[in-house]
Image (tube, coloured by chain):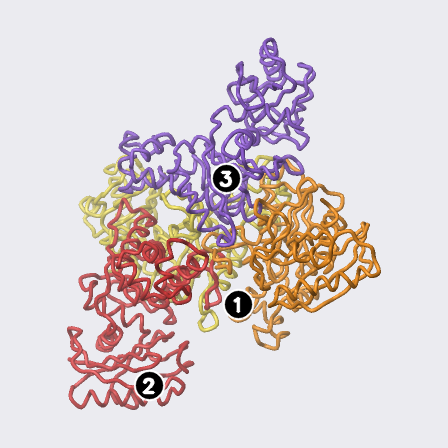
Chain colours: A yellow, B red, C purple, D orange
Amino acid sequence: MLSIGVDIGGTKIAAGVVDENGRIIAGAKRRTPAQDPELLEQAVADAVRELREQHPVVAIGIGAAGFVDADRRTVVFAANLAWRDRALADHVEALVGLPVVVENDANAAGWAEFRFGPAAEADTMLMMTVGTGLGGAIVLDGQLVRGAGGFAGEIAHMTAVPDGQWCGCGNRGCLEQYTSGTAMVRSARAAAATGDPLLEPLLAAAGGDANGIDGPLITRMAREGDPGAQRHLTEIGDWLGRGAASISALLDPEIIVIGGGVSAAGDLLLDPARAGYARTLTARTHRTVAPFAQASMGNEAGMIGAADLARHR
Amino acid sequence: MLSIGVDIGGTKIAAGVVDENGRIIAGAKRRTPAQDPELLEQAVADAVRELREQHPVVAIGIGAAGFVDADRRTVVFAANLAWRDRALADHVEALVGLPVVVENDANAAGWAEFRFGPAAEADTMLMMTVGTGLGGAIVLDGQLVRGAGGFAGEIAHMTAVPDGQWCGCGNRGCLEQYTSGTAMVRSARAAAATGDPLLEPLLAAAGGDANGIDGPLITRMAREGDPGAQRHLTEIGDWLGRGAASISALLDPEIIVIGGGVSAAGDLLLDPARAGYARTLTARTHRTVAPFAQASMGNEAGMIGAADLARHR
Amino acid sequence: MLSIGVDIGGTKIAAGVVDENGRIIAGAKRRTPAQDPELLEQAVADAVRELREQHPVVAIGIGAAGFVDADRRTVVFAANLAWRDRALADHVEALVGLPVVVENDANAAGWAEFRFGPAAEADTMLMMTVGTGLGGAIVLDGQLVRGAGGFAGEIAHMTAVPDGQWCGCGNRGCLEQYTSGTAMVRSARAAAATGDPLLEPLLAAAGGDANGIDGPLITRMAREGDPGAQRHLTEIGDWLGRGAASISALLDPEIIVIGGGVSAAGDLLLDPARAGYARTLTARTHRTVAPFAQASMGNEAGMIGAADLARHR
Amino acid sequence: MLSIGVDIGGTKIAAGVVDENGRIIAGAKRRTPAQDPELLEQAVADAVRELREQHPVVAIGIGAAGFVDADRRTVVFAANLAWRDRALADHVEALVGLPVVVENDANAAGWAEFRFGPAAEADTMLMMTVGTGLGGAIVLDGQLVRGAGGFAGEIAHMTAVPDGQWCGCGNRGCLEQYTSGTAMVRSARAAAATGDPLLEPLLAAAGGDANGIDGPLITRMAREGDPGAQRHLTEIGDWLGRGAASISALLDPEIIVIGGGVSAAGDLLLDPARAGYARTLTARTHRTVAPFAQASMGNEAGMIGAADLARHR
């Protein structure tokens, strides 16, 4: 039984036929008409049509950045696309004649890790996606947690530091301001700009301009053993672990999966996360401390997860 | 279909026959043999036998303070009773010949509020119990969240303040150190001891001794309009709301129920909680802001919830 | 005995003949040649010459934003002017043939308040200047505190919140990020942008655009009784008082003078500062709690203070 | 020209004849009659008389824990002795017929380091005394800073963490709760009690009882290379440096002297303090970063400093 997963990004739409083992059998791409929801839906339908010519599919799952309602049909709000309360599932169903579900992209990617990745043996999972920002997905007893209005899993906006760094969401001290690629780069740039000698190699590698320091550079130099770069991965890793410990006090997950672009740093990020977690997890002498695993489904996790969710309930 | 709920406290055991509407039909009490698990189990069995003489029951639910495993059979650890990995359900089943489930007491009380209290119409609920400490219960899509090892719902030990007040759990800055009866009393005593003029009426009512200030006194004087007492309810109410906002970023509950002894203060606690929540809830212009409701099931919530959970799966 | 005070701002140079009672007898203005230190020094000399034609003066005091060395002769660094290790006093002395001292502008303004303003009766004073940023001046036993390298009084960059808001200085959580006009406006804009109902009048007065909210608008509406505007003055006032309490643990000043543009709000700023101070001052039952007074020397404080400092030692 | 320094401790009174180079020429000891101020003054006078039999002295300086008024004559409040507004200088002068000054003990010890210790070449010094608690002394331009009421130098009670650990002074988050022997021991015990594997050697050395861990044990094991012990010295060292950076924003000292019992750990404490200082000092690329030096005057610093202060003004 095949289904199609569609990952709507800010610049391109990636669709794929996915089998029951999470394998992508065929793919199709379109540009994203970001300003016109109707054109966007037609582009999705068009990619779906192309794939259905060769493959019999039973359902369509669409992953999109933004708030999706709890019924998985409507995009309530998306920061990067021209959607406000857009009945995306209805519209695409009308165009393609197949059942459609819509899912927040972090949820879709988390689901792929839960079904086919490092959490495949678990019932209960916390996924934390460390990219430019911080995303999250929660699976409890085999069910993706969506919340009353579809807003669950916004781990980025738990408060990590009262009166801390202002966040774009309008609050202060959100966890995303302390553990994300943006947080890491900001911290490294500030240290470099104030003449921290540990940052000299990183600054030199950025051509002497602190603003030239970016996430991939930090990760690369950290891997090469540069202590300045490692410090900044450690810093966000520690906060990642501390955030995971707060979430575990609430939800007691069996496994914690770390994905997103920054997770490419592997144990340079995960080891400090494990340390921060172990240090701040409540009742840690009485319980099994959850393992941290690196996500394994890569950039296609969103597509695969959306396809799989379309098949399930 | 009737079941028996048993609430094991530090000093007494309260058992009751509970019907499907959450009504208590009959009750029995015993002292708690806190130091001897075997005697305690016999006391529970004895109370159950007394109740069964008059009432046909199908199951027993036991609520107990402490960590209960995810299978709801074993008490892993209890701070106040002599239990370590005690197979409580097995033992009581052997004594009474009926199916037994064990549940953390905060979970049991939360379940009663979810089934028969202010959350009866909701699918998804966060309960926060503000007593001496801070307890929690989470219901998502009609299911009580227990976590992989039965440790879920420990909202007390989310980190509210990095490097904050040390907690008995070995961490710093746990939410319970900022919103609980103990936190309120500690704050009021400190203010009174340092000569804060706003605290003079409270100090006078405590006979001039700051250590004489306790929770019931603060609540009573706050109700009578004393601004000093109200300030300290407001302080923990604000933290309660801020904690609820962090949890809502994760779980997006439909309703937030506030119980526990301090919740007797009503809106003097709930209004600042609502304000702290609204101020720090992410994306609050795009979503429905969850209402705060006062728990309604009273001291018997644990017994009623345990009985009801024994009937359900 | 008369002296001349010169206040070098980003756009204009204001010079004045000041008598021993801090009164300005005559004034002269020039544009600031911000990009050319030599032209700037000539402009200062030119204004001085104009004033000396009518008035016999014995010394020149120059107040400038930036770090001035402890000898009061060299501008080490100035953010807004093209100065790096500029021997300003030497150059102007050569041009005008009179003794010249240079002083940080916040120090000069603080000195004016100490000599002729609300601290005239005190020996020991803390001045906090709440404008766009946060400035400070400390007088102990009648002496302006300059520090080993002339960097004392930078109250803006004490840490108020560990891991708090990033500051332009490269650190996190600096006091200036919590108590300054910029901090107040940022907080009010964020609250307005997230739909806080208390901010609706302020948002309406700003034409519906959160970015239209500025400091003078907040102050005006706070004076008219708007609770939203008052809240944001209260917020920075509370931090102002808490910062003053930390400083008082160190220095135990006799009086705290609050100046700067935001201090025009008067008790709407000072009352919450007093409350935050009283709440967090150590040993407050054993000591005299320092009064908070509004600065009285206005925009000319820097000129008057610089002139007076030129006369003294 | 000789003077006598008297150090009044909780259990014994140590007096010494001190020469102009800070050398102790002769000493005398008495027990402290802690509950009777009059007996205590007689004991001081008695020790002074014993010393004067052999040595001509011109003045007496008394160092005492507690708040001493700005005139250096009256003990306003002392936590450990039965003094409230006690005119100590008057009483001892009447008994011995020599000029007497009273000084806070941390100030007296700091003065000794300033005059004869590592700060002997400096004009401006910050001293931080890390013992059970945290003491401080500030010298600016060669003058000990006492403040308007004699309360200056209480660095322990600057706020390090808003809403942080409660302090005995009635406030929250005081620096002393983060950098002091007590803070170090509390942190190590908590880590050991929660099963932190890094703490196993320290726990074993304490006989398996977390409460057996104390400051000298941590210091000894840290010196022997134990990473768990080192971590806890590093933790309080980092806060020490961060506190010093906040103070330096205000006062810009030339040198920072670290004394007290915990400073016996040397660079195991000072290196992390230097790192925390460098990381959080504002404008550090534009200024000379103050060196950290270990105090050198030992336990007799208070006596020597008090004697020297009695000679000066």
Q: Are marks 3 and 1 on the same chain?
A: no
**What residue is shown with label 2?**
B90
x and y percentages locating residue D196 in the rendered image: 54, 68
x and y percentages locating residue D172 in the rendered image: 47, 56
Residue C211 vertical placement versus B139 (above, below): above
* Subunit of label 1: D
x and y percentages locating residue D242 in the rendered image: 58, 49
In which image quadrant can residue D198 be found? Answer: bottom right
Residue D311 vertical placement versus C215 (above, below): below
**What residue is shown with label 3?**
C256
Q: Hey, what amino acid is under mark 2?
A: Asp
**Depth check, front residue: A19 or B224:** B224
Label pair 2/3, CB-CB below 8 angstroms: no
Q: CA distance from mark 2 to mark 3?
A: 69 Å
**What residue is shown with label 1?**
D190
Quick check: can you spot residue B136? no
In which image quadrant can residue B204 be found? Answer: bottom left
Q: Hey, what amino acid is under mark 1?
A: Ala
